[in-house]
Amino acid sequence: QVQLVESGGGLVQAGGSLRLSCTASGTILTMYATNWYGQAPGKQRELVASISSLGSTNYADSVKGRFTVSRDNAKNTVLLQMNDLKPEDTAVYYCNAVRRTYTRTYDYWGQGTQVTVSS
């Protein structure tokens, strides 16, 4: 059974930093494109950052230059380093791993971790 577990969320003041982790069990995360989504209260879930199975990265315009997504393959983990946090970054952050083969798509989600940025 595949599970993704996020950790590292919390309460931080504006300008502070957090590092989120997404650790997989039951599969090898390097086989997947891994995405971080944020869902603010009353809003739709939005893609914040992603890293492909080959290591290429993409970011939402709102976080470019502040957030960095990376892999720790030894720990089967994808990290999201969040710097210079702003109150508008407050959201529940979800990890999503996707892998497509010729015959099916594998799509897994974590339970989310709360990030709250105070002004």
Image (cartoon, helix red, strand yellow):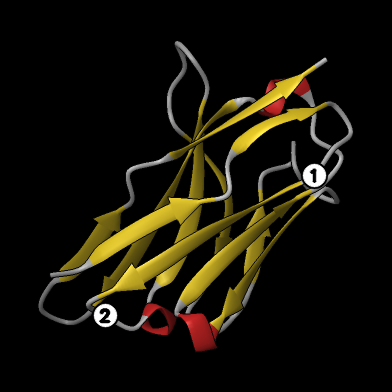
Q: Quadrant of residue 32?
A: bottom left
Q: Which amino acid does label 2 sit on?
A: Thr
Q: Count residues near mark 1 (Cα–Cα under 10 Å), then give few for <14, some for 14-19, many for 20+.
A: some
Compared with 17, 96 (above or below) is below
Label annotation for residue 27: 2
Depth order, front residue of 57/38: 38
Mark 1, residue position: 17
Amino acid found under the numbered disc labelled 1: Ser
Q: Which residue is drawn at 67% across and 52% down?
A: 59
**Residue 103: image location, x then y, percent:** 10, 78
x, y (%) of residue 56? 63, 75
| Horizontal and vertical percent position of residue 58 | 65, 60
Numbered tag placed on residue 40 in the rendering: none
> Is 58 on the left or on the right of 46, as rendered?
right
Label 2 sits on a secondary structure element that is: loop
- Of the 4 image quadrants, the one containing the N terminus is bottom left
Q: Nearer the viewer, residue 70 or 12?
A: 12
Position above or below: 66 against 69 = above
Side of 64 where 78 appears, left or right: left
